[in-house]
């Protein structure tokens, strides 16, 4: 899960992590939407890396692809889950404190 940080240059990070095309798509969005879409992309990438059990470089070098689902834990945050195959059932709970 990814939560927003106070200050970050989403476009610079997107260029480095996702490539120039993805950064250009983000650049066309208004700042609140840009931040949300960046968090979603980052969460998806992190889920895939963790599924691979390695580093970002190793994940980019592999030919296999996991099944990835976006999770929506709340406004201003993003999450994703990567699995070997499509889940038949996925249960999510909301815990309130």
Image (spheres, helix red, strand yellow):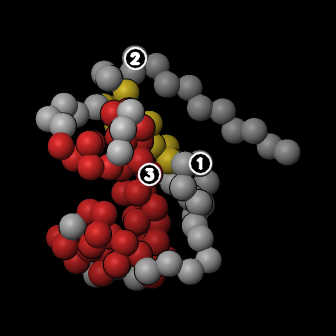
Instruction: Name the residue located 22 percent from the left edge and 47 percent from the top edge.
Output: 60
Front disc: 3 or 1: 3
Q: What is the C-alpha distance between the residues marked 3 and 1?
A: 12 Å
Marked residue nearer the N-terminal end (3 or 2): 3
Q: Which residue is mark 2?
A: 88
Q: Report the disc number at residue 73.
A: 1
Q: Quadrant of the C terminus?
A: top right
Q: What is the C-alpha distance between the residues marked 2 and 1?
A: 20 Å
SS at circle 3? helix
SS at circle 2? loop
Q: What is the C-alpha distance between the residues marked 3 and 2?
A: 22 Å
Specify the farthest residue to the top.
88
Mark 3 and mark 1 residues within 8 Å of each other at the beta carbon: no
Q: Residues within 10 Å of mark 3 (few under 14, many from 20)?
A: many
Q: Which residue is mark 3?
A: 43
Q: Quadrant of residue 87?
A: top left
Instruction: Name the residue located 44 percent from the left edge and 51 percent from the top edge.
Output: 43
């Amino acid at each position: 899960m990814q939560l927003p940080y106070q200050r970050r240059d989403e476009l610079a990070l997107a260029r480095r992590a996702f490539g120039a095309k993805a950064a250009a798509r983000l650049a066309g969005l208004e700042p609140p939407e840009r931040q949300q879409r960046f968090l979603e992309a980052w969460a998806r990438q992190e889920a895939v890396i963790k599924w691979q059990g390695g580093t970002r470089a190793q994940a980019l070098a592999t030919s296999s692809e996991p099944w990835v689902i976006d999770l929506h834990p709340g406004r201003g945050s993003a999450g994703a889950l990567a699995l070997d195959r499509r889940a038949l059932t996925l249960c999510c709970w909301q815990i309130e404190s």
